[in-house]
Image: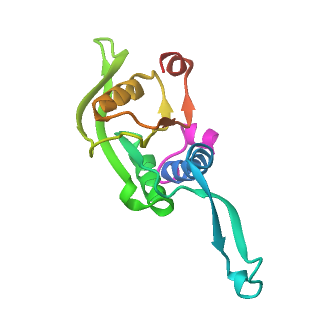
Amino acid sequence: ELASLCSPETQQPRVNDLISSLYTFLFRTVISHEFPTRIEQVKTRMAEYHPNEGFYTGPILDKETRAISVNLARAGTLPSHLLYSALNHILDPKHVRQDHISIARKTNESLAVTGSEVSGHKVGGSCQDAILMFPDPMGATGSTIVEAIDLYKPFGKPKKIIALHCIVTPEYLKKV
């Protein structure tokens, strides 16, 4: 799917279909590895027939986890919306938020990328102890994610910062 997404022949609506499929897999992987769980006992449908055995006891996602999906307006809009929707289904929606940052590449006279520039944002409040997530398909230079993370510094210290990219460059890895 990633190879197909990267292909110059791939056009809409296939681009959005591939982004949706790739990010669904990525979200599930990240949430299962990075989000807190707690041990809980849950009565199952089998409890009616096996009163002493009809329970699941084990880890479940902590639904009280605070999570923020950040829309980096450009290619991050669809992935952020998908993440926001998914988080609202698996966490308590009162702890889920979507923020928006209008951010673009900054270029010089020869159109070489020199950084990123925020032209506006809607941050819905504190990110203290939240899992702050940036779903953005391409980590190219690293300027966008660094600028976005810096924007959140006055809003508290998140529990975790997670960038979710489909592909990154060596330049991105060095900068971030």
Residue located at (52% from left, 36% from top): 165
Q: Is residue 86 left or right of residue 28?
A: left
Magenta segment, which residues?
A: 1-14
Measuring from the top left, give residue 116's x and y in whole percent: 33, 23
Q: Does residue 122 sit above or below 59 in this rendering?
A: above
- Is residue 3 in the magenta section? yes
Q: Does residue 69 sit above or below 176 in this rendering?
A: below
Q: Nearer the viewer, residue 174 or 171?
A: 174
Instruction: Write down the quadrant of residue 154 in the picture.
Output: top left
Outermost residue toward the top in this view: 109
Measuring from the top left, give residue 60's x and y in whole percent: 61, 58
**Colour setting:** rainbow
Residue located at (48% from left, 17% from top): 175
Outermost residue toward the bottom in this view: 49
Instruction: Write down the quadrant of residue 143 in the picture.
Output: top left
Outermost residue toward the left in this view: 120
Measuring from the top left, give residue 119's x and y in whole percent: 22, 31
Q: Does residue 56 sit above or below 122 in this rendering?
A: below
Give the total of numbered labels: 0
Q: Does residue 29 sit above or below 153 in this rendering?
A: below
- Is residue 160 in the magenta section? no
Q: Is residue 98 left or right of residue 62?
A: left
Measuring from the top left, give residue 86's x and y in whole percent: 48, 57
Quarter of the figure that contains the N terminus:
top right
Outermost residue toward the front in this view: 52
Residue located at (30% from left, 13% from top): 108
Q: Nearer the viewer, residue 135 or 96?
A: 96
Q: Is residue 105 left or right of residue 176?
A: left
